[in-house]
Amino acid sequence: MGINRITLKRNSKQLLRTSNPNPLIMGLIYFIITYILSNLSTRLTGVRVDVQEYTNALQNMDLVFFQNIIKDYDPSAGAVLIDIAIRILMVLLHAGLIIFVLNTLYKREGASYYNLLDGFAVTGRVLVLYLLTVIFVFLWSLLFIIPGIIAMYRYRMSLFLLLEHPELSPLQCIEESTRMMSGHKNELFLLDLSFLGWIILTIIPFVSAYVTPYRQLTYAGFYDALKRMQYSGEHDYTGYDDPGPDIF
């Protein structure tokens, strides 16, 4: 018994078809904005290398080639500051997307494409949560990579809790996420694996406009299932056993 991922994904697809505002339009807006920001970040600080040159250098163990890459990676202080601002902006846009997803899941009147900007209203809390999560995962990773991965899953509900419960501090959200995820990290890991096929397809332009709202609605459903199981005394989400792995 537990959280049935196929039911979660079926419910998410239903929301994609029937919700208003349309999550697919939000996915398209989010994709366009983040695509532009990501490319701007790469142009500011990244080193663009020809794939064939990189492959040849790797095969021939051409250390000079890689030394030149490192030497060329020398963005100005202004470029670094702008890149940091872009990354902060993307974190806040992601928070806004989660607000939209939660409003859509719970069919709230506040659901709107403007939810994408709502993360800016809680900038401080979101950034503190993000920094704490990065620090904690990094510290666990110092022990070994596996504890770091486990920590990532332990804290996955933190942002949902932060956006749903303004009375909780970022640290309290992390602690509550740890409690909620106890015994459910493996289920979330399998849910992530079930999206593998879609993630591969995101190499095709604009596929992310569908995959992003689909995945986030499903993760919001997972969060909702945890709340119902732990706060209402329910023992499973669907009432029947997990039917097994799926890719799409």
Image (cartoon, rainbow, N blue to C red):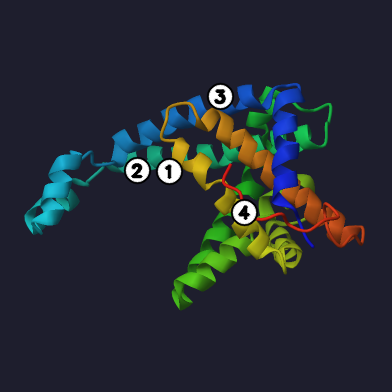
Q: Nearer the viewer, mark 3 or mark 1?
A: 3
Q: Are marks 2 and 3 in contact (CB under 8 Å)?
A: no
User: Which residue is found at the position 50% from the left and 43% from the top?
Assistant: 197
Quadrant of the image for the N terminus? bottom right
Name the residue beneath numbered marker 4. Answer: 245
Q: Marks 1/4: CA distance?
A: 39 Å
Instruction: Look at label 4 and name its amino acid.
Output: Pro
Task: Please name the residue that numbered disc 3 is placed on.
Answer: 28
Nearer the camera: disc 1 or disc 4: 4
- Residue 233 appears in which quarter of the rendering? bottom right
Image x and y of residue 170, in percent: 68, 57
Q: Which mark is residue 84?
A: 1
Residue 139 showing in the rendered view = no
- From the image, state whether disc 2 or disc 4 is nearer to you: 4
* Foreground residue among 216 and 114: 216
Sequence-earlier tag: 1 or 4: 1
Q: How far apart in space, not on screen, are marks 3 and 4 (Cα)?
A: 28 Å
Query: Is the residue marked by circle 1 packed among few (<14), some (14-19), or many (20+) residues within 10 Å?
Result: few
Residues under numbered marks 2 and 1 in contact, where contact means CB atoms less than 8 Å apart = yes
Mark found first going from the N terminus, 2 or 4: 2
